[in-house]
Image: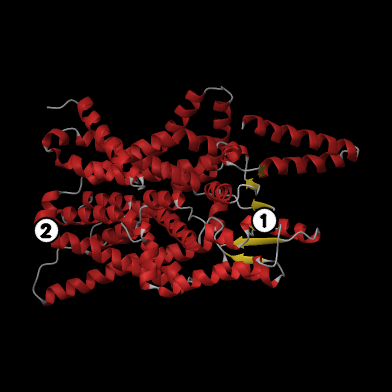
């Protein structure tokens, strides 16, 4: 019998080889964990002896994943993507659930007509539909960030859908146990009780939790101990997870609430940095346990059934999502990419399916083929995303034409200007900058991914084109080599780093000025090659100080000198660190 230490070493060895192999192939690390789990599943009883203990630890990965999602799930982000989240995302989840129920009733009638058994209940169909509605946030977001597609037209739709899926997990985690515990005649009683319990708990946490969280974290921070601060974050996260579990809900819901509460404090970025190592390692263990669910005997004995379950749901889900995106105004190419990116199963799909199995809502005979099909769909996702352009061009030839026309349109406008400022993003900051440039008779060209923003800007007389700033073809078409400067006006560090990389590689003589929300990423952007990094929080504080001192009666020249000194000290310190 292997000791727990020996089992842990084997898990780590396979994980390291899997992640290194995927990195060499430019694939996400999560895929390496899945592959490691698949190979470990062939280890027999020696590995499986301690599998339960490892699975218990891996559950903490899901808890921390929900915690990180809660950190990101703040009101400003929801407001920016509200149409994508509560329009496109909600429609995708609800229609997937409805389609699963309709498919269940249709198949049950057909099976009865053919006098064949059909063991699935409508409650089980709800569980399968909920699992099918989920996509892999970990894999898709990671690959989109590496490909600098988070701010693209299809990227915004994908992020909106993933955000709503993550939000929908919370009521689904309440709904599935209620379906499992209900008896005939008291369906609505059980559901109402569970939802009321969740609403009361969430309401209490949001009503008083934010104030308590701010005060408590401020007290802990004054102790000047990183260890104590980290212990408190883990205690809060796991404590709320324990509280919601014992309230009849789920651990994942409690950790989600902990993330939301901390997101409203001043310690959000610090917590994200501190929790990420724990989150990545434990989530990696979770993906290993998912890979171990791929039973080779099931593949050998039921491979036609597994193949059907892997291919048909992916195609149907991709088609549904693409149709919704197209109905929402997306072009054929954008709709197709959105469908391809979201077609696979997701990590929370496994959580919901396991919960349904535990509640007896799904016959155990379904579990192995369905789990194997879900793992195969996740394994195929990185390859589908990498070859998405080829797939889109094959099935939507007009997408290539539309992109060519977009580049041609940008180039035609750029030919008329020289020594101009290339502005990436035309939000409030970009618009104000362009208005100031116009007042000084300085030429500019702005790029923005949102067609509605561009349409409104053009009607107002601004020189703005539809285009992704992180694509080299668009930057070159906008006259990058002839530009006097490039300004990244949006607050997206990952995309800004990509723009900096492209400019430094293809037009190193052009300075890049980057905006960031606060000083958190200033040094990172500066080291990447940005000429100047402007933090919103610092400049807003200077503006507040200027107006305050002016109202207090200080002379204007003294105020200007104080502001100049503070600004020089801030940016000079950044240059010294670089």
Q: Residue at x 36, y 47 (%)?
A: 26
Q: Report the label total.
A: 2
**Residue 96 at x, y = what percent?**
34, 65
573, above or below 400, in the image: above
Image quadrant occupied by the C terminus: top right
572, above or below 494, in the image: above
Q: Is residue 452 left or right of residue 96?
A: right
Q: CA distance from mark 2 to mark 1?
A: 61 Å
Q: Is residue 167 left or right of residue 505?
A: left
Mark 2: which secondary structure?
helix
- Circle 1 is placed at which residue position? 483
- Residue 257 figure quarter: top left
Q: Residue at x 52, y 22 (%)?
A: 225
456, above or below 367, in the image: below
Q: Which of the labelled discs sits on residue 302, or is there none?
A: 2
Mark 1: which secondary structure?
loop
- Residue 526 figure quarter: top right
Mark 2 vs mark 1: give the one in front. Answer: 1
Can residue 537 be seen at all in this image of the molecule?
Answer: yes
Query: 10 Å neighbourhood of mark 2: few (<14), some, or many (≥20)?
Result: few
């Amino acid at each position: 019998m292997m000791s727990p230490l020996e089992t842990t070493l084997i898990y780590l060895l396979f994980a390291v080889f899997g992640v290194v192999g995927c990195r060499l192939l430019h694939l996400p690390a999560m895929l390496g964990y899945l592959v490691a789990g698949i190979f470990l599943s062939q280890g027999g009883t020696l590995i499986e002896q301690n599998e339960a203990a490892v699975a218990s630890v891996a559950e903490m990965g899901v808890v921390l994943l929900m915690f990180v999602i809660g950190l990101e799930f703040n009101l400003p982000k929801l407001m920016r993507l509200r149409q994508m989240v509560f329009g496109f995302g909600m429609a995708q989840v609800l229609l997937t659930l409805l389609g699963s129920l309709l498919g269940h009733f249709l198949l049950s009638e057909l099976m009865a007509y053919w006098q064949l058994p059909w063991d699935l209940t409508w409650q089980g169909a709800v569980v399968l539909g909920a699992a099918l509605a989920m996509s892999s946030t970990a894999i898709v977001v990671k690959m989109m960030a590496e490909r600098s597609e988070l701010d693209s037209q299809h990227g915004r739709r994908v992020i909106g859908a993933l955000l709503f899926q993550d939000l929908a997990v919370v009521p689904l985690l309440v709904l599935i146990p209620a379906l499992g515990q209900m008896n005939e005649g008291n369906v609505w009683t059980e559901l109402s009780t569970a939802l009321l319990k969740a609403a009361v708990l969430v309401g209490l946490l949001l009503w008083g939790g934010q104030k308590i969280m701010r005060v408590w974290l401020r007290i802990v921070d004054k102790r000047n101990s990183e260890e104590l601060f980290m212990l408190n974050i883990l205690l809060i996260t796991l404590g709320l997870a324990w509280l919601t579990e014992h309230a009849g809900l789920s651990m994942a819901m409690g950790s989600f609430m902990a993330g939301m509460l901390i997101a409203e404090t001043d310690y959000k970025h610090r917590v994200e940095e501190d929790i990420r190592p724990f989150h990545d390692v434990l989530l990696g263990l979770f993906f290993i346990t998912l890979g171990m669910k791929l039973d080779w005997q099931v593949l050998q004995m039921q491979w036609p059934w597994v193949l059907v379950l892997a291919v048909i749901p992916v195609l149907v889900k991709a088609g549904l999502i693409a149709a919704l995106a197209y109905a929402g105004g997306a072009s054929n190419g954008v709709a197709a990419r959105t469908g391809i990116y979201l077609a696979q199963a997701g990590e929370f799909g496994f959580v919901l399916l396991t919960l349904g199995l535990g509640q007896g809502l799904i016959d155990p005979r379904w579990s192995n083929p369905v789990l194997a099909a879900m793992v195969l769909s996740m394994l195929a996702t990185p390859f589908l995303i990498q070859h998405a352009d080829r797939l889109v061009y094959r099935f939507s030839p007009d997408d290539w034409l539309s992109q060519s026309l977009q580049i041609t349109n940008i180039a035609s406008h750029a030919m008329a200007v020289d020594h101009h400022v290339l502005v990436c993003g035309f939000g409030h900051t970009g618009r104000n900058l362009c208005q100031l440039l116009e007042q000084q008779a300085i030429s500019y060209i702005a790029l923005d991914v949102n067609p509605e923003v561009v349409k409104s800007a053009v009607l107002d007389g601004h020189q703005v084109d539809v285009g992704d700033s992180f694509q080299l073809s668009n930057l070159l078409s906008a006259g990058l080599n002839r530009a006097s400067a490039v300004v990244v006006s949006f607050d997206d560090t990952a995309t800004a780093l990509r723009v900096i990389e492209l400019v430094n590689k293809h037009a190193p003589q052009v300075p890049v000025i980057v905006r960031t929300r606060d000083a958190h990423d200033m040094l990172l952007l500066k080291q990447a090659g940005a000429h100047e990094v402007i933090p919103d929080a610092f400049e807003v504080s200077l503006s507040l100080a200027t107006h305050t001192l002016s109202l207090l009666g200080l002379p204007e020249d003294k105020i200007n000198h104080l502001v100049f000194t503070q600004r020089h000290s801030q940016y000079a310190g950044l240059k010294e660190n670089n």
